[in-house]
Amino acid sequence: MQFTPQEVKMIERLRKDERSWLRWRWIIFGIVPLGLAYVGCFIYTIFRMLDSKTISEAQTAMVIAVFWPQALLVVLVAAALTGLAIRDWHGRAHRVLLLKLIEAHKKELRRDEKGG
């Protein structure tokens, strides 16, 4: 079986993605705590503002209304990235299997060429 140039290009892209995933999974686990720390600081600031006498309750409500959707989005993205990193920690199974099958096929072809 011979691969077309387009298929070879796709296989090389799969290999590149698989190699780069090793770095990206750690980057994801670095980004997630930063996002959660942001949300924690936001919640802490809100509680401090509620106890404060310098800012009115209406202003506090406005800050919550403006920043709460953003904080909620950060939590959802952090949860999704954590799930992605845990699910694909050792790489995507179908991608790894496909690359192993291609390598085994190439080895078999080389063995046949040497023997035949």
Image: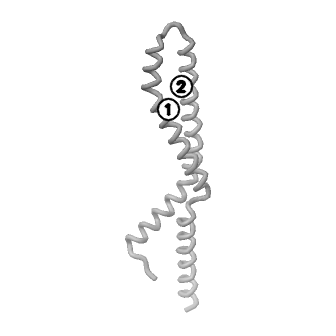
Q: Residue at x 58, y 28 (%)?
A: 40
Q: Residue at x 54, y 35 (%)?
A: 35
For residue 71, the mark is 1
Compared with 78, 71 (above or below) is above
Whichever of labels 1 and 2 marks the residue nearer the N terminus, that label is 2
Compared with 22, 76 (above or below) is above
Rendered image coloring scheme: one colour
Q: Label 1 vs label 2: CA separation?
A: 8 Å
Q: Position of residue 84 (x, y in %)?
A: 55, 51
Please tell me which residue lies in front, 26 or 72.
Answer: 72
Please tell me which residue lies in front, 39 or 69.
Answer: 69
Q: Position of residue 29 (x, y in %)?
A: 59, 43
Residue 27 visible in this rendered orientation of the protein = no
Q: Position of residue 10 (x, y in %)?
A: 43, 66
Local SS, label 1: helix
Q: Residue at x 38, y 72 (%)?
A: 5
